[in-house]
Image (cartoon, rainbow, N blue to C red):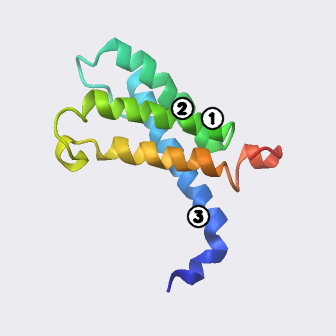
Amino acid sequence: MAAFMQPFAPQTYALMRIIVGLLFMSHGLSKLVGWPVPMPAGAPAAIVYSAGPIEAIGGALIAMGLFTRWAAFICSGQMAVAYWMAHGLKAWHPAANGGEPAVMYCFVFLFIAAYGAGAWSVDASRGAS
């Protein structure tokens, strides 16, 4: 049934990498500059100024496909830490503790780190994937 998608696998992966990178970048921009939504009042400065740059810069690098493996690996680690800091100790299951987005980002970034930038990336254009 889904064999018709096989020829589009490189482009589909690139779209996933770009969209996930842009979404993650928006989390960092929210922390750092209050756009597209402001940070909730009382957010710890340590979180804002440590996670914000990783999310903003890492997301941008992943979306562009520049230094993709390293950026994705660092972002994956940050999401693993974020999960345990903010969600993992509240309940045993991510659906119960609100940590599903952190888990999904963590493992999508881990896959991107292993797979590389792929098509439509700066890394591919410079011969480094």
Q: Residue at x 77, y 49 (%)?
A: 124
Residue 24, percent from left and from top? 46, 39
For residue 74, the mark is 2
Residue 32 versus residue 119: which sits nearer the camera? Answer: 119
Counting residues from the N terminus, which is met first, the one under dot 3 or under dot 1? 3
Residue 23, percent from left and from top? 45, 43
For residue 70, the mark is 1
Residue 65, percent from left and from top? 66, 44
Q: Residue at x 43, y 16 (%)?
A: 49
Distance in Å between CA atoms under marks 3 and 2: 23 Å
Q: Name which residue type carries label 2.
A: Ile
Which residue is disc 3 drawn over?
A: 12
Counting residues from the N terminus, which is met first, the one under dot 3 or under dot 2? 3
Residue 37 appears in the figure? yes
Q: Secondary structure at mark 3?
A: helix
Whether residues under marks 1 and 2 lie with C-beta atoms below 8 angstroms apart, the answer is: yes
Q: Name which residue type carries label 3.
A: Thr
Residue 15 versus residue 51: which sits nearer the camera? Answer: 51
